[in-house]
Amino acid sequence: MKSVALKLVHDRISSLPDSVLCKILSFLPTDNAVATSILSSRWRHVWTSLHTLLFDATVCIRQGDFTDATMEMFEMFVISVFLRTAPSNVQKFTLHSYRVSGSGRLKEWVSSAVMRDVRELELNLENQQRLELPESIYSCRSLQVLKLDSDFDIAVPGSGICFPNVKFLRVSLQYPENQLTEKLFASCPSIEEMWLKVYLKYDGPATNFIISSSTLKRFYWTVLVDDYNFAFNNCEHKCIIMAPLIQILHVVDDLMVSYEVHDLQFLQTVNVGIFFPDWSVLNPWEAVQLVNAVLNCKNLTLSSGVILVRY
């Protein structure tokens, strides 16, 4: 009887260099990347060289396991990863959570990423009161992509320079004050693409947004309200756009703010969607004025409400 020769299957993936394995792990949420440490002794410490840190606590909610205890375990996991990883730089740090226990802990994590020369930073806290950001983030020179998808307490430094090398900025603001909206968007010297989502009140104080930039090329602007059951008092919020290099402009406006647009000579694509629930209480000239200011673009898309007013 002939013996059966067993062929050993060579583990080609494990034989790859650490730099390649880390690149593969960078596409996974960090908890999954850490879990690969149990595969074999070869994988035990690979994850500690990760340059991409992706933390998502909302997995707990999707699994129906959201408790204070599980959130505390998640936060301790984030802390342990920062303590055990030792890359000279962090290319990307993403935090998506229902909440964090306090601004001190958030500042600690963001400061750790800044100290490691983070290039891309994304923060999304779904149900959290406004939190402060660490001062170091405002002067971080390695940061190029910043996504603040929750309402944070943003303070423009006294120097007047904010996020000096950020080229892509995405910000969500709830009922912001003029002290911020009149300064922030004129203080980012390298910005090329900006996504700005704001929540305003019909009966709140008038807010002025000054978008002044010599580098901005793509601007996506969304105005939302929380309650459509309102008594309109004709509060005039205003958006002033002074960015001559803009090529793409997208406007989605549920409130019909007043627009002042200056000399956009390089416009390529414009999308204007104004979805005010009751046009009868507004002066339609506000919408006409915005459309007239962007008629020099090559591609123009208007919502049905704007077309009705315009023509």
Image (spheres, rainbow, N blue to C red):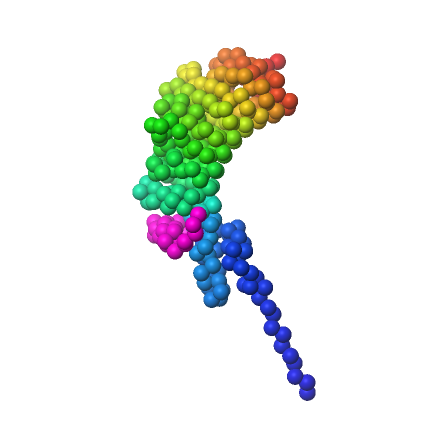
**Can the viewer see residue 244?**
yes
Q: Residue at x 35, y 28 (%)?
A: 159
Question: Residue 20: percent from the left, percent from the top?
Answer: 54, 56
Please report the residue visible at 54 percent of the width from the left and 17 percent of the height from the top: 263
Residue for point 56% across, 16% down: 293
Task: Note whether 198 is above or below 262 in the view shown.
Answer: below
Q: Is residue 163 above or below residue 37?
A: above
Between 269 and 291, the residue placed more toward the observer is: 269
Magenta stretch in the rendered image? 63-89
Residue that lies at the very extreme toward the bottom in this rendered image:
1
Q: Is residue 287 visible?
A: no
Question: In which image quadrant can residue 8 be found?
Answer: bottom right
Magenta portion: prevailing SS class: helix
Q: Is residue 240 magenta?
A: no
Q: How many marks?
A: 0
204 vs 21, nearest the viewer: 21
Q: Provide residue 1's location: percent of width, then percent of height.
A: 68, 87
* Position of residue 134 measured from the top left corner of the image (x, y, whole percent): 34, 38
In screen coordinates, is 209 left or right of 295? left
Q: Nearer the viewer, residue 185 or 173?
A: 185
Give yes or no for residue 81 being in the magenta stretch.
yes
**Residue at x 42% of width, y 33% of height:** 163
Image quarter of residue 149:
top left
Residue 254 in the image, given as x and y percentages of width and height: 49, 24
Assign the C terminus to one quadrant of the image: top right
